[in-house]
Amino acid sequence: MTRPEKIRLGDLLIQQNLLTQDQLKLALEEQKLTGRKLGRIFVESGYVSEEQISQALARQLRIPFIDLKVVNVKPELTRLLPEAQARRFRAIALEDQGGMLQVGLVDPTDLLAYDEIVRLVRRDITLAVVTESQLLNTIDRIYRRTEEISGLAKELQAEMADVPIEFGELLGLTPGAEDAPVVKLLQTVFEEALRTRASDIHIEPQESRLRIRFRIDGVLHVQTEADPKIATAVALRLKLMSGLDISEKRLPQDGRFNIKVRNNPVDVRISTMPTQYGESVVMRILAQSNGILGLDKIHMPSHVLERLRHAIHRPSGIVLVTGPTGSGKTTTLYAALSELNTTEKKIITVEDPVEYRLPGINQVQVHEKIDLSFDRVLRTSLRQDPDIILVGEMRDQLTAEIGMRAAMTGHMVLSTLHTNDAISTPIRLLDMGVPRYMVALALQLVLAQRLVRVVCDSCGEPHVPDPHEREWLRYELGDNVMNYRFKKGVGCTHCAGSGYQGRTGVWEMLEMTGEVVEAANQDDPALFMQAARKQMAGNTLRRAAVALAAEGRTTIEEAMRVASQTED
């Protein structure tokens, strides 16, 4: 292909009726003031989308526009361009076309990029147009840093093997700390964790290796394995960062710290635990750039959302969100809090730990070592004239009773409880020793939830249920099982070969209506279960998961996993 010609983007968009003269004039004035690229100004001002710009360039140059969301790029081909150059020139190698290499560019009129890419790949190239956001996301996925992390781990091992050793220099406590081996290793690990959307980092010393794993979409994946000799230095550095006692290696410790990863602030919760071969470290990553989701953004079904909103806007009562660890309970509660958070309301949270920070809310971190317990903070909170109280978890009878009394005396209380489903929650409170009248009068609504993995858009294919799956689905879908379009991901670069990308929630809800409250007041669990099932009308977690599978959004396997967690 011949070298591209320069095109005036503004004139091109006007010519194709995507931009007006006035918009171009305003954008040019802003470009003079800020020096930013004109295309970026068009997009951020809302004049055109990235896709519209790319498609306009493709039409003008008579080259293809490639949608990287649906194209399964080949990593071995993409890596023909080193990552630094791919990012610099906003380019990606897409397809081997015999003697030519197809390369996607954000700006296919960039002559310097064209010449440099030809020199780097040592082949003739054909051009295609891609959007910048899709390109950067693809680069983040393809150029995995597993080898770099392994290399930095080996570098740290080599440093530790040298004697004598200056531990302060090794751990980055002296000037030029950013060049210390352990600092570079951890920085790269955090960068890779954010790239892969990991929620947790597990650093686990074993007998013959140090294993680093990431939890992505609820499933652990091995990131790298290194020499176990570096485990001490890694744990020590993390404890220093989080202000933990570095001399204490026999007892578990918890802490948190803030770092910046590629200019994004990240809040990290850390837990250390002594194991047979050293200290195991687990870190929960809370990227502040993601923000707190609102109730409208967590994909809750409209009938559930409407009833939840009605409950949390009541002046008093208690709303419980239930489910196992990692089921998204805190996300749902904070979505509710962000909606309730106005200047007219005083909100106090009692948590262990404080996971998200919300402006305008009084958040208290429980600290058992100094007797700052849930029940003590909760009692004090009631003297602070609150309108809404969030209790991180109903852990014991005392905390539950105080929360119930608060709900009965004019406060809205939000909290969580570890139960399998909505129906078993009131029974669990009774088992904890909470008086029956309190449960009946204070409890307004129970929301049970799970997270299911979503089928990857790029590699999801039709799936025919096997006989066992058909029989299982028939319970919810009847004899029309084969009329639904089930899907399953085969694995691609977009989902790192897992077949899934992202997660979504499934919910069931029990409202304490008059009939349910009356049944709860009776000393007959069977009567309560009957009334509760009638009120829920079959809208269970199992049914919600099967509905997602029938829509092709998740797999039958995921739906069965959710059902197995809720059925006793």
Image (cartoon, grey):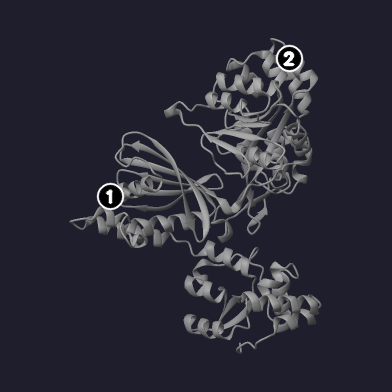
Q: Which mark is residue 472?
A: none
Dot 2 lies on which element? helix
SS at badge 1: helix
Q: Is residue 338 above or below residue 163?
A: above
Q: Quadrant of the C terminus?
A: top right
Task: Give the percent coordinates (x, y) of residue 179.
Answer: 34, 62
Tag in front: 1 or 2: 1
At label 1, which amino acid type do we have? Lys
Placement of 337 over or under 552, stated as above or below: above
| Number of residues whose C-alpha sits closer than 10 Å to that of mark 1, classed few (under 14), some (14–19) or many (20 or more) | some
Q: Determine if residue 192 is in view.
A: no
> Quarter of the image holding residue 356?
top right
- The kind of residue tagged 2 is Leu
Mark 2 lies on residue: 527
- Please name the residue shown 56% across and 47% down the image: 217
Residue underneath mark 1:
229
Q: CA distance from mark 1 to mark 2?
A: 60 Å
